[in-house]
Image: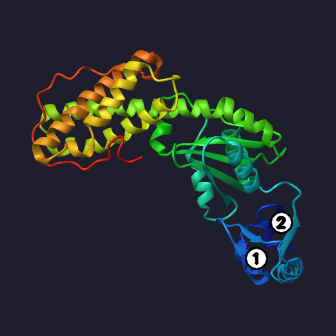
Amino acid sequence: MSPAARITLHTSPNDGIVALPVGPGSNWAVIALDLAGFESADEGIHILPMSDLDRVQRALDTLYTHANRFNVQVSTSHQAFIGDIGREIARRLHGSWTVEAGNCMLAPSDTRTRLRFLWDSSKGPLSDTLRSYEGEVAAAAFLYEEETGLELAVLRRPWDGQIIVGALASTAMFTSLETVTPVSVAASDVAGVLRQVEETLLPSYEHALAQAHFRLLERVLDQIREARTNGAVSRIWSLNEDLCRHWYGLEQHLRRGLYGPLPEPLDTLLRRAEVALSEDSAQGEEGAVQLLEQWLHEGTRLVDLVRSLDPDLAARGVPPPSSPALPPGPPHQGRRPGTSR
């Protein structure tokens, strides 16, 4: 009789023994791990610390006993655990990255759902692996940098063990835009893949995010102008939050050196806008209307200035504002650049 489930064991310098339950009967595998004293960690992953070797031996004996009883196959992998690979990459990247690993072999699997936000070309190694060998990818690690919002996915290619790293989109909307797609990378070891992440993946990721925020900022500015023309007051205030979000997203990438040191006109615009669009600028209904008027003016200037630096960033132009002044409306409490960092 074929096993109802499998448990793969990895040795980890960080976690001790790492166990990944797999298969349609994975609930029985989890029960066996619980009875053996393994601790639940990230999604679908169990660990057994190596601090007490006697306890480790008893736990493994218990695991094999219950696994045999529940028809669960236990095997040992000599490959490094994907979470350790993710932590090593994160440790050597610039910034402060958090790492979370997850089991792709569960049903349902939040880890597999997160991988649907993959932002990669159809010919990229990560996209190709998930498309052709999705059912064989056991686990993945996710690296997240809170200050920048960058998120990377790390996994092993099933047939040759190559380490693959790719970018994830913060929203599915980004993947539907016609932007330059981030480039996933692959290598046989951490040093090799890290070099490609720094030289290829992260720069292409930054450019794609900047391009996405730029195009969505253009879109929101157009929508606000249209709402002004039609007198759709409530629509204007709801769009203000989107305008703030994409302004701030684009500003982040500009300040991190997308075009190198900020050109003086761009630096001046961003600094002036931060002061003009501060929380204290909106006092009452009249102040809020003036604030949104400033947002529209500064947003248009930002789009025009960035386009002059990089004509290929946008596929279409933004028409100059020609509609009447904003109608009055309730103050909007949307996020503003410089106030939510």
Quadrant of the drawing holding the N terminus: bottom right
Per the rendering, the mark at residue 329 is none
Q: Secondary structure at mark 1?
A: loop
Q: What x and y, as percent, mark residue 276? A: 25, 35
Q: Amino acid at mark 2?
A: Leu
Q: Secondary structure at mark 2?
A: strand
| Left or right relative to 191: residue 293 | left
Q: What x and y, as percent, mark residue 263? A: 44, 19
Above or below residue 261? Residue 26 is below
Q: Amino acid at mark 1?
A: Phe
Above or below residue 296? Residue 172 is below
**Residue beneath label 2, please?**
9
**Residue beneath label 1, please?**
38
Q: Nearer the viewer, residue 263 or 53?
A: 263
| Left or right relative to 163: residue 320 | left
| Numbered disc in front, either 2 or 1 | 1
Q: Earlier in the sequence, mark 2 or mark 1?
A: 2
Above or below residue 126? Residue 273 is above
Above or below residue 229? Residue 9 is below
Q: Is residue 148 visible?
A: yes
Q: Is residue 123 visible?
A: no
Location of residue 198 by image quarter:
top right
Dot 2 and dot 1 residues touching (CB under 8 Å): no
Q: Nearer the viewer, residue 46 or 74?
A: 46
Q: Nearer the viewer, residue 40 or 338?
A: 338
Q: What x and y, as percent, mark residue 275? A: 29, 36
Q: Nearer the viewer, residue 316 or 276?
A: 276
